[in-house]
Image: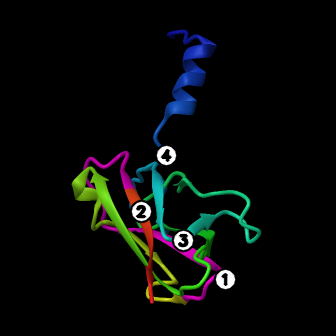
């Protein structure tokens, strides 16, 4: 019988791949994907809190798996003293490029008109296709939240 050092055994246990089984008994593999998305604001402020004291520079989405959806709440403020802003969101600079499609970012404030000085809550939703396979283990993208004067 071979002896395995406790350190080696712990390494095997903590770095092992988990293969969950559904009721049918078929193995299902999973893949964790991590991301941090950079946030750029144009003509509006983007914050973590309703009091607009903590600016959002990036959003950590955590570890993602195929079929997952993750929500993050942010706050948008129209900083212009006299003009309402129409809100739009865009993503750009996807790395790898093939992640754009199986991974989709949406939000609940597209085309919303935001009056001057007003703060609103926005829900950002990152969805990962259940069919996402391949070599995407990490990805990144930039998100722009744009206010266009009305």
Viewer-closest of 97 and 69: 97
Quarter of the image holding residue 103? bottom left
Which of disc 1 and disc 3 is earlier in sequence?
A: 3
Cα distance between the residues tagged 2 and 3: 14 Å
The residue positioned 74% from the left and 60% from the top of the image is 53
Q: Position of residue 112 (x, y in %)?
A: 50, 89
Q: Check disc 3: other Cα within 10 Å, few if <14, some if 14-19, many if 20+.
A: many
Viewer-closest of 67 and 77: 77
Which of disc 1 and disc 2 is earlier in sequence?
A: 1
Instruction: Report the number of numbered marks.
Output: 4
Quarter of the image holding residue 88? bottom left
| Residue assigned mark 2 | 143
Q: Position of residue 14 (x, y in %)?
A: 57, 32
Tag shown at residue 18 = 4
Report helix, strand or loop for mark 2.
strand
Report helix, strand or loop for mark 1.
loop
Cα distance between the residues tagged 2 and 4: 32 Å
Disc 2 to disc 3: CB gap under 8 Å: no
The residue positioned 64% from the left and 64% from the top of the image is 47
Disc 4 to disc 1: CB gap under 8 Å: no
Does 38 lie within the magenta span?
A: no
| Residue assigned mark 1 | 118
| Residue assigned mark 3 | 44
**Quick check: 78 above or below 39?**
below
**Quick check: 68 above or below 78?**
above
Indicate the quadrant containing the C terminus: top left, top right, bottom left or bottom right: bottom left
Q: Position of residue 60 (x, y in %)?
A: 55, 53
């Amino acid at each position: 019988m071979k002896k395995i050092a406790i350190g080696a055994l712990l390494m095997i246990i903590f770095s092992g791949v988990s293969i969950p089984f559904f009721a049918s008994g078929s193995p299902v593999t999973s893949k964790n994907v991590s991301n941090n998305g950079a946030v750029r604001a144009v003509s509006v402020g983007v914050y973590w809190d309703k009091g607009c004291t903590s600016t959002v520079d990036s959003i950590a989405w955590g570890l993602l798996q195929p079929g997952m959806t993750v929500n993050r709440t942010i706050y948008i403020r129209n900083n212009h003293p006299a003009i309402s802003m129409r809100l739009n969101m865009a993503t750009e600079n996807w790395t790898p490029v093939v992640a754009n499609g199986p991974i989709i970012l949406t939000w609940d404030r597209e085309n919303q008109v935001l009056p001057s000085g007003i703060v609103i809550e926005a829900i950002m939703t990152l969805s990962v296709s259940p069919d996402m396979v391949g070599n995407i283990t990490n990805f990144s993208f930039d998100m722009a939240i744009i206010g266009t004067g009305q």
